[in-house]
Image: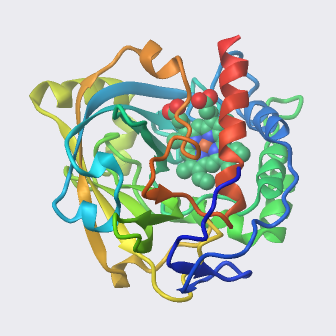
């Protein structure tokens, strides 16, 4: 990926912390092959044919995005100047297309494409403020230790040893385990996990993490409610919900402060102490045929407009584009 960040008004130090100034610093050398990561992710989910390497089970939907009055003050993206159409997909984390909707600790995913004649704005986000790994090599290792053995189960000892040696990879699971299983794809918040840089028409750059706040609130299932549910209920729940009206999410920018890490998606910012600016509202209106979402991939790296940039120093960000492309070619052929 060759992108110039020199026009931005922030500095990312070699250590990946946010300070004031212009952006410098190259991504750390990370050499895990995106194809190998995709293979390991698919293997960990039981090696099912024609599946996404993550988010294999999901529901395709459509709706619109309406920006707030404040949004253009932060970003010059055309998508922040008018209501635009949205194609989106809610999903369960992982490559097991038969995973139970009751699974825990598993992220729920929300991939969305805001379309505009000038180009798309794509975000692919999860129901946790942190990702599970901080480098592509660590993701490869994380997935590899989860490969099922001859008995169809991964080696619990190997997983334990990996977690002990890589404590930051346990944060996401701990966060999810501390919360109930969502009752609805529309009843949980989603996070972009990476630090984005928003640049307005005057060239002023702001580093922010993005969060999608569910208008329905956090709809968690009690243990008894969870037990009573079938393994697949999200698709029907969403259909019933949308028959009554759109399911919406406020897109909020949580503004970075000095020393907030910008290159490590396993670390959350203390968001209760960060200024939050509403950028707009995503309103999901209807179910869309799977084919619409299956035809392409939601590429959160390449499909960004001027005025929204991913983090140059976060190695987990850049690797998503080639990995999603490999996954698409595997499931499309
Ligand atoms: C770091 C934050 C990340 C988040 C929040 C995230 C989230 C998601 C979500 C929600 C999906 C489902 C997309 C859909 O419904 O079509 C997905 C798909 C996928 N993710 Fe990620 N992911 C992240 C990082 C990565 C990384 C680092 C890799 C690999 C290096 C990766 C590999 C994939 C692949 C291969 C797919 C399937 C894409 C397709 O077939 O269309 N993800 N991801």
Residue 199: which quarter of the image?
Answer: bottom left
Q: Where is residue 11 drawn, in percent x and y?
A: 59, 81
Q: Where is residue 191 drawn, in percent x and y?
A: 44, 57
Q: Where is residue 271 drawn, in percent x and y?
A: 39, 76
Above or below, 186 against 193 in this view is: above
Q: Residue at x 48, y 63 (%)?
A: 129
Q: Residue at x 29, y 21 (%)?
A: 287
Q: How is the image coloured?
A: rainbow
Q: Would you say 62 lies left or right of 141 here?
A: left
Where does the C terminus fall, quadrant-wise? top right
Residue 134: which quarter of the image?
Answer: bottom right
Q: Would you say 302 lies left or right of 316 here?
A: left
Q: Residue at x 34, y 64 (%)?
A: 201
Q: Where is residue 4 drawn, in percent x and y?
A: 63, 61
Camera-side residue: 282 or 18?
18
Q: Would you say 90 lies left or right of 287 here?
A: right
Above or below, 252 against 93 in this view is: below
Q: How many marks?
A: 0
**Residue 221 visible here:** no
Q: Would you say 85 lies left or right of 104 here?
A: left
Camera-side residue: 172 or 21?
21
Q: Residue at x 79, y 41 (%)?
A: 34
Q: Quadrant of ligand 1?
A: top right
**Residue 92 visible here:** yes
Camera-side residue: 179 or 139?
139
């Amino acid at each position: 990926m060759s992108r110039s960040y020199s026009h931005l008004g922030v500095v990312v130090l070699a250590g990946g912390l946010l300070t004031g100034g212009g952006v410098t610093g190259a991504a750390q050398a990370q050499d895990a092959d995106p194809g190998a990561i995709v293979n390991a992710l698919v293997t960990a989910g039981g090696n099912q044919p024609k599946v996404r390497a993550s988010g294999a089970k999901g529901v395709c939907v459509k709706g619109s995005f309406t920006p707030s009055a404040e949004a253009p003050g932060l970003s010059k993206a055309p998508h922040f100047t008018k209501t635009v159409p949205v194609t989106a997909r809610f999903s369960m984390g992982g490559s097991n297309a038969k995973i139970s909707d009751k699974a825990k600790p598993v992220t729920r995913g929300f991939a969305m494409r805001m379309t505009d004649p000038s180009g798309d704005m794509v975000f692919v986000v999860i129901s946790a403020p942190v990702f599970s790994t901080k480098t592509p090599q660590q993701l490869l290792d994380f997935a590899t230790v989860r490969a099922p053995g001859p008995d169809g189960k991964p080696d619990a000892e190997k997983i334990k040893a990996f977690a002990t040696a890589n404590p930051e990879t346990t944060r996401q699971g701990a966060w999810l385990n501390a919360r109930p299983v969502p009752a609805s794809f529309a009843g949980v918040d989603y996070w972009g996990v990476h630090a984005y840089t928003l640049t307005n028409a005057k060239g002023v750059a702001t580093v922010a993490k993005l969060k999608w706040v569910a208008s329905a609130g956090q709809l968690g299932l009690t243990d008894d409610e969870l037990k009573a549910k079938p393994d697949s209920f999200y698709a029907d729940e969403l259909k019933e919900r949308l028959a009554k009206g759109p399911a919406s999410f406020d897109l909020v920018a949580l503004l970075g402060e000095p020393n907030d890490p910008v290159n490590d998606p396993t670390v959350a910012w203390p968001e209760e102490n960060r200024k939050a600016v509403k950028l707009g509202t995503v309103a999901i209106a209807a179910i869309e045929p799977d084919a619409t979402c299956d035809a392409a991939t939601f590429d959160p790296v390449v499909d960004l407009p001027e005025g929204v940039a991913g983090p140059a120093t976060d190695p987990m960000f850049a690797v998503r584009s080639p990995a999603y492309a490999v996954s698409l070619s595997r499931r499309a052929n």
